[in-house]
């Protein structure tokens, strides 16, 4: 089976840096996605990691360690509009058609 | 491109009623998915399809049915609505597989009373 853990909620200040962690245990693993979901809206794609290491995309970076079953999403220069839920999702090996989502981390950015 | 569209946006059903949630995509994607999201929870996969005429169960298929007669459309059917099916339903599509980015529709908020 699959088990994905994320903190339920985090708070941060505008302009700061925040790191959202995700740990997973799966019967096999292919890759890991991060999605952003604003309240009442659909999830939108942020990043996809297959190999170990850091992928940087503007203010957002995502890191993966396959051996540790661990990923994090790093958000820099936080803006108010970054207040949203951040969903970690894994693709189990052999389950190329499927994503398994964590429960998400709700991030609140304050002035 | 409209992307992934879903209708209706909101619906209230009585216990035992039936309804179909509509989903369409105009990106010529092969893969389509139905998820439900309960308050404060992640997305749970209900059904998915890898192409017209091919569907398979996800994690929580009980109480639902799907069909995929065309590449564009992937309706979700609730036959006998129950309060446990109160949720937000998202349809998504991806070009080739689960390793591709999934594009989500705006969601249908369903309440069963």
Image (spheres, coloured by chain):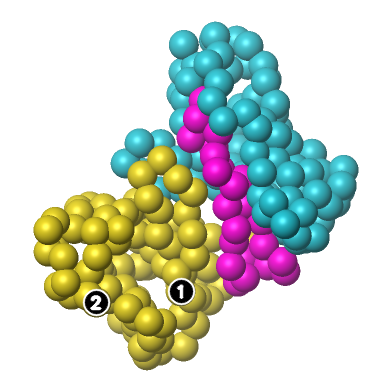
- Say which of B96 and A82 sits in front: A82
Q: Regarding mark 1 in the picture, which secondary structure is present there?
A: strand
Identify the subunit bearing mark 1.
Answer: A
Which of labels 1 and 2 is toward the front?
2
What residue does disc 1 label? A47
Q: For residue A76, which numbered disc appears in the image?
A: 2
How dense is the environment of label 1, judged by Cα within 10 Å: few (below 14), some, or many (20 and up)? many
**Chain B color in figure:** cyan
In the picture shown, does residue B61 fall above or below B97? above
Q: Is residue B98 visible?
A: yes
Expressed as whole percent of the image width and height from the top left, the position of residue A91 reads 53, 68
Residue interval drawn in magenta: B88-110
Left or right: where A52 falls relative to B81? left
Using the numbered discs, state the Cα–Cα distance from disc 1 to disc 2 in whole angstroms: 15 Å
Name the residue at 24% across, 59% down. A80
| Contact (Cβ within 8 Å) of mark 1 with mark 2 | no
- Say which of A69 and B66 sits in front: B66
Please identify the quarter of the rendering in which residue A85 is found. Answer: bottom left
Identify the subunit bearing mark 2.
Answer: A
């Amino acid at each position: 089976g699959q088990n994905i853990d994320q903190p339920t909620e985090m708070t941060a200040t505008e302009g700061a840096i925040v790191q959202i962690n995700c740990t997973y245990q799966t019967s096999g693993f292919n890759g890991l996605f991060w999605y952003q979901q604003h309240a009442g809206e659909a999830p939108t794609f942020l990043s996809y990691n297959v190999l170990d290491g850091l992928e940087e995309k503007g203010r957002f970076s995502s890191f993966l360690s396959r051996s540790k079953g661990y990923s994090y999403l790093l958000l820099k220069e936080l803006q108010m509009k970054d207040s949203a839920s951040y969903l970690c999702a894994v693709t189990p090996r052999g389950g190329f058609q499927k994503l398994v989502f964590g429960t998400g981390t709700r991030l609140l950015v304050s002035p | 491109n409209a992307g992934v569209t879903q209708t209706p946006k909101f619906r209230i059903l009585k216990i035992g009623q039936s309804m179909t949630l509509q989903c369409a995509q105009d990106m010529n994607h092969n893969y389509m998915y139905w998820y439900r999201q309960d308050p404060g929870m992640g997305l749970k996969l209900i059904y998915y399809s890898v192409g017209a005429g091919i569907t398979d169960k996800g994690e929580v298929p009980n109480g639902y049915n799907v069909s995929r007669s065309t590449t564009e459309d992937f309706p979700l059917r609730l036959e006998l609505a129950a309060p446990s099916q109160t949720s937000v339903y998202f349809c998504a599509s991806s070009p080739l597989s689960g390793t591709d980015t999934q594009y989500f529709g705006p969601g249908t908020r369903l309440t069963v009373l």
